[in-house]
Image: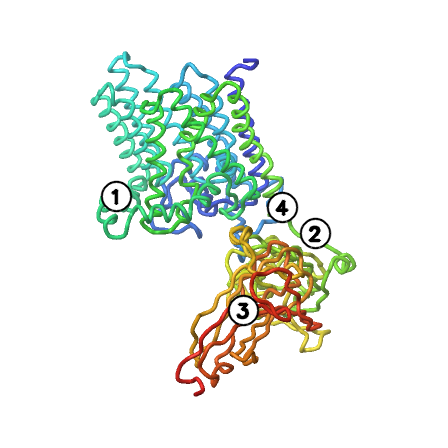
């Protein structure tokens, strides 16, 4: 190699520290998973040099029930900052970030900001300690392939979620490192070989037990790391059967756990009753569960609903799990992960290691750790419990497995795929602080009134309370589809500061005023500008994004915007000083939201029943063959746009008797006006129904009636010509089929 392995490893550690520092500096105080509780725990240790009493709550999202090893290490540099904390977290009203950034969080830091930043620095160093463990484990498992160990170490070092956490205060950092250390402690036993002295093997097993026991000192789920190390150890010892050496592992682990229980006042063993026992009970009850509710069916259901969220949060999930890189990055990473699994399977076949102890060692270590959150999610029937953070202690095993697959690829593929697996996570880790974190925490730019009015698409004059005026808005996404995000930018003018904390509430409705139950709440100014910090005269723009995750689509939507008291939850009154009372409104936007691509693709190649000249296709229709006279007749349609329509059309249904006379009809724009044709675009699929009310059918004679349908221009009333169909057409009206009216309400 043109660079020595030690130098490469040193470069990896330095690069990891720099990336973690980049994440840390771009993440405001307390803006990581439960960092309020993690910091409070470590800060208490640094100030009191003692564990907090069991049962007390230092702060919201308290973590004082956790084992103390990680917090004790993080507390060491905090001891350089004496005195009481001068800052406390202020939670946002909602949105993608959780804590309002502090103006005091600027260099040179002082007080609480300095203590938290020093704690993050210690966490950064702790997180880098796992890299040499992964490298050493790879060398122990495959001593003849040093490239394998280096690739695994690099993959581990640059994994975005791990890098982000190491730049914050979180005991997940300690779990990632202790997971790598435990795997190394077991893997090094492979390097001893079958001919190693028995005493040396027993000593190595005892040391592995100590490391596995230390996992319970870090976090409650450290017990599953210890379980994984134990299972992996028995894979290593299966052929030699040195059970006394295995006993040395058990003794070393138990002694370490007991010592931890004494030091931590029972915190290391508390999870046995609260975390381990319920899962063991669930496993023991699995046979009856399978019989009663179908355990395997529930497992499939939970994994099918939660696997993507689980992978996304394992790969890169920032803030409190609410910030993520662009979805395209995650999808590319998912594709690479699937290719890696295939490559690893091929590699196992080529290396004839299907039953080999090396892959078995990695597999059982991974399953022991990953099985715990999976089982928990299945028993609770809650896919959100499949958070990727719970799988991170097995990151070392995953890195070795991926590197194994890349190393055993054919020579012409090996280097290219190794580069992809190395550069992919590294580039995401490098770009996320700039493209994800900075944009999420960037405060709004102050505008002049002239600049704001130049950018406003629809001017408004709505005053909320007497504190802020809505000047107008701009629609960022005039069109969207189900599952995508709709964005709108509002322009505000601060009239005066306020002592109370108000949040912004955005709701989504269809054009008939029906709520889609989609709501976003946040602190003003992208969660950076709480109302008690408002300077009078400030003019700023803020963009609100709402995901169209559920609703009866396609439809036109609009937003309503309000301010609410974050304590009482009451909405702030609003008025329009310069508008007539009938025109005063807090409604913003008119956005067309189509169906998602799966539904559109399902109908993409369907043949049309009829085609109209303007580019409208009828794909399907249906209505009952028999209707009672005291009931309504519902005719269902499935429309498709061959091109952009751009004109307002109405659809109609006529009911004709046996003599061809019109006896009932109903006209309406598509979906009752919720998705008019002037917003249709090529490929849109629009389900619709037209109902002939029972009042129009009541009193008609029993018998058979023909149902006809057509389209006309809503402004000119001119019927649209039918271009092609196999059905009967008269005067541009399509004869669909017949239905029979009967029942006691029919005329005799």
Q: Which structural element holds mark 2? A: loop
x%, y% of residue 477? 65, 55
Residue position marked by numbered label 1 in the rendering: 283
Colour theme: rainbow
Q: Earlier in the sequence, mark 3 or mark 1?
A: 1
Distance (Cα) linking label 3 and label 1: 46 Å
How packed mark 4 is, by other alpha carbons closer than 10 Å (few <14, some 14-19, many 20 or more), is few
Which is nearer the N-term, disc 3 or disc 4?
4
Camera sees residue 604: yes
Point out the image quarter for the N terminus. Answer: top right
Circle 1: element type: helix
Tell me the element at label 4: helix
Q: CA distance from mark 1 to mark 4?
A: 45 Å
The structure residue drawn at horizontal position 67% and vertical position 78%, both measured from the top left corner, is 581
- Say the numbered circle drawn on residue 514: 3
State how far apart marks 3 and 4 are (Cα). 33 Å
Instruction: Determine which residue is flagged by label 4.
Output: 439
Image: 307 above or below 238: below
- The residue located at (29%, 33%) in the rendering is 259
Q: Locate residue 12, reporting x and y percent.
A: 53, 25
Q: Residue 307 is drawn in which quadrant?
A: top left
């Amino acid at each position: 190699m043109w660079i020595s392995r030690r130098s490469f490893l040193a470069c990896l550690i330095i690069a990891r520290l720099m990336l973690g520092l980049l994440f840390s500096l771009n993440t405001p105080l307390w803006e990581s998973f439960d960092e309020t509780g993690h910091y409070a725990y470590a800060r208490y240790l640094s100030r009191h040099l003692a564990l907090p009493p069991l049962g007390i709550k230092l702060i919201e999202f308290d973590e004082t029930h956790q084992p103390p090893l990680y917090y004790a290490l993080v507390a060491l540099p905090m001891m350089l900052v004496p005195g009481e904390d001068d800052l406390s977290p202020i939670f946002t009203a909602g949105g993608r970030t959780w804590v309002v950034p502090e103006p005091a969080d600027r260099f040179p830091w002082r007080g609480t900001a300095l203590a938290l930043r020093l704690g993050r620095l210690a966490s950064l160093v702790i997180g880098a300690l796992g890299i040499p463990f992964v490298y050493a484990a790879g060398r122990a498992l495959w001593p003849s392939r040093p490239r394998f160990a280096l690739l695994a170490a690099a993959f581990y070092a640059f994994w975005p979620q791990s890098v982000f956490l190491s730049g914050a205060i979180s005991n997940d950092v300690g779990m990632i490192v202790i997971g790598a250390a435990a795997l190394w402690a077991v893997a090094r036993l492979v390097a001893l070989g079958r001919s190693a002295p028995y005493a040396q093997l027993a000593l190595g097993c005892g040391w592995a037990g100590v490391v596995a026991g230390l996992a319970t000192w870090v976090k409650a789920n450290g017990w599953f790391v210890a379980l994984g190390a134990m299972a992996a150890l028995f894979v290593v010892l299966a052929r030699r059967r040195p059970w006394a050496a295995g006993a040395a592992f058990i003794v070393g682990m138990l002694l370490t756990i007991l010592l931890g229980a004494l030091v931590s006042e029972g915190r290391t063993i508390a999870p046995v009753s609260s975390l381990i026992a319920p899962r063991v009970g669930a496993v023991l009850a699995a046979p009856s569960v399978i019989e009663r509710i179908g355990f395997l069916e529930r497992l499939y259901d939970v994994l099918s609903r939660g696997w993507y969220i689980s992978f996304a949060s394992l790969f890169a999930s920032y803030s409190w799990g609410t910030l993520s890189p662009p979805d395209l990055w995650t999808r590319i990473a998912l594709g690479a992960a699937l290719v890696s699994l295939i490559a690893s399977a091929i590699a196992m076949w080529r290396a004839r290691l299907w039953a080999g102890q090396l892959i078995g060692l990695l597999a059982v270590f991974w399953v022991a750790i990953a099985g715990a959150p999976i089982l928990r999610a299945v028993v609770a029937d809650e896919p959100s419990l499949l958070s990727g953070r719970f799988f991170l202690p097995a990151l070392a095993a995953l890195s070795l497995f991926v590197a194994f697959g890349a190393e055993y690829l054919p020579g012409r593929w090996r280097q290219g795929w190794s580069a992809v697996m190395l550069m992919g996570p590294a580039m995401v880790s490098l770009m996320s602080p700039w493209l994800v974190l900075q944009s999420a925490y960037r405060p709004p730019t102050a505008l002049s009134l002239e600049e704001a009015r130049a950018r406003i698409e629809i001017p408004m004059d709505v005053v909320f309370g007497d504190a802020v005026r809505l000047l107008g808005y701009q629609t960022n996404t005039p069109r969207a589809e189900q599952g995508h995000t709709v964005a709108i930018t509002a322009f505000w003018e601060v009239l005066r500061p306020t002592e109370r904390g108000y949040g912004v509430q955005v709701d989504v409705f269809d054009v008939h005023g029906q709520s889609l139950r989609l709501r976003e709440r946040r602190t003003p100014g992208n969660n950076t500008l709480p109302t008690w910090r408002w300077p009078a005269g400030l003019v700023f723009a803020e963009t609100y994004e709402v995901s169209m995750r559920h609703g009866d689509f396609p439809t036109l939507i609009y937003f309503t915007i309000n301010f609410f008291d974050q304590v009482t939850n009451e909405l702030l009154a609003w008025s329009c000083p310069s508008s007539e009372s009938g025109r005063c409104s807090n409604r913003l936007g008119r956005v067309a939201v189509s169906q998602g691509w799966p539904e559109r693709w399902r109908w993409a190649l369907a043949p049309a029943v009829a085609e109209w000249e303007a580019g409208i296709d009828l794909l399907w229709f249906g209505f009952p063959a028999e209707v009672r006279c005291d009931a309504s007749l519902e005719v269902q349609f499935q429309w498709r746009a061959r091109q952009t329509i751009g004109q307002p059309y109405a659809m109609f249904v006529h009911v004709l008797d046996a003599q061809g006379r019109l006896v009932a009809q109903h006209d309406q724009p598509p979906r009752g006006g919720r998705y008019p044709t002037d917003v249709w675009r090529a490929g849109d699929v629009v389900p619709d129904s037209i109902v002939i009310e029972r009042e129009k059918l009541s009193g008609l004679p029993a018998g058979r009636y023909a149902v006809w349908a057509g389209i006309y221009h809503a402004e000119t009333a001119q019927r649209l010509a039918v271009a092609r169909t196999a059905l009967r057409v008269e005067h541009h009206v399509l004869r669909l089929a017949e239905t029979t009216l009967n029942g006691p309400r029919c005329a005799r």
